[in-house]
Image (cartoon, rainbow, N blue to C red):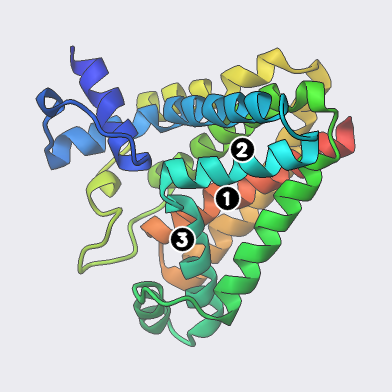
Amino acid sequence: MQPLRLILTALAFLTRIPVPAWVGYSDAQLNQSVRYFPLIGIGVGAFCAGVYLAAALVWPSVVALLVALVATVLLTGAFHEDGLADFYDGVYGGLSIARRLEIMKDSRIGTYGALALLSVLALKFAALASLPPAQLPLILIAGHALSRAFAVSFIHSHDYARSDGGKAQVVAQSLSLPALLFASACGLLPLLWLPPGIFWVLLALVVLRIWLARTLTRQLGGYTGDALGAAQQLSEMVFYLGVLALL
């Protein structure tokens, strides 16, 4: 039952879906559930794909896609989108690490965050709308899974930036190499459903990771929960753009 308990813990953390009371909660339990985040990504992607297929029975593909993306944001409570906006507000709005971390804790959204959020959402929608409708469901599943594995990788490679707590402090305790490999396998698994050439998009994600890793180290001194949200959103966007370029 422990793996199921951890999967449901990850589900409750990353989405608005309620879980049974017997799942319980502890900091250690949430920390151990991190390896299952990409698995939850597969589920979120499958939900998005399902909404798209259902909506496509009623509306044109572009409208169905927009409905699916909105439904997915509602499912996750804009968890990652909020992190993206806070990350850009902090990184580009502060002149010191302490000030950047302080800005990122502010619940209000600023100019940098708003522009980043609108840009990423627009690029994701434009890329997906330009892809063949028949391939969209599998691409959505792969994008959500891979992007969460991408974000989780920073928990293994970087230190947590805050010393005064934060929404990611619990999951930031440690991520062993076996846990990272399991998370990576879950993130890469949906790519097997796509044409083999799709794996070239991983090169673009490597470039993104190098840039983001340097940004986190220099600008924040590590990662935060908002940084993980930004990593998920940026990698999802790059994945869709890369798939569009390859196809």
Location of residue 181 by image quarter: top left
Tell me which amino acid carries mark 3: Asp
Q: Label 2 neighbourhood size at 10 Å, few (<14), some (14-19), many (20+)?
A: many
**Horizontal relation, residue 161 to residue 226: left or right:** left
Question: Which one is closest to the eye, mark 2 or mark 1?
Answer: 2
Question: Viewer-proximal residue, 177 or 138?
Answer: 138
Question: Viewer-proximal residue, 132 or 144?
Answer: 132
Q: Residue at x 50, y 38 (%)?
A: 148
In this view, 173 is above or below 11: below
Kind of element beneath mark 2: helix
Tell me which amino acid carries mark 2: Ala
**Which residue, as the protein is rendered here, is positioned at the far front?**
58
Circle 3 is placed at which residue position?
A: 82
Question: Which one is closest to the eye, mark 3 or mark 2?
Answer: 2
Circle 2 is placed at which residue position?
A: 68
Q: Locate the C terminus and report the quarter of the image it occupies.
A: top right
Q: Residue 163: percent from the left, percent from the top?
A: 23, 67
In this view, 168 is above or below 145: below
User: In this view of the protein, can residue 209 be seen by the observer?
Assistant: no
Q: Label 1 neighbourhood size at 10 Å, few (<14), some (14-19), many (20+)?
A: many
Q: CA distance from mark 3 to mark 2?
A: 19 Å
Q: Earlier in the sequence, mark 1 or mark 3?
A: 3
Q: Earlier in the sequence, mark 2 or mark 1?
A: 2
Q: Locate the N terminus and report the quarter of the image it occupies.
A: top left
Kind of element beneath mark 3: helix
Q: Residue at x 11, y 38 (%)?
A: 26
Q: Residue at x 34, y 79 (%)?
A: 102
Q: Label 3 neighbourhood size at 10 Å, few (<14), some (14-19), many (20+)?
A: some
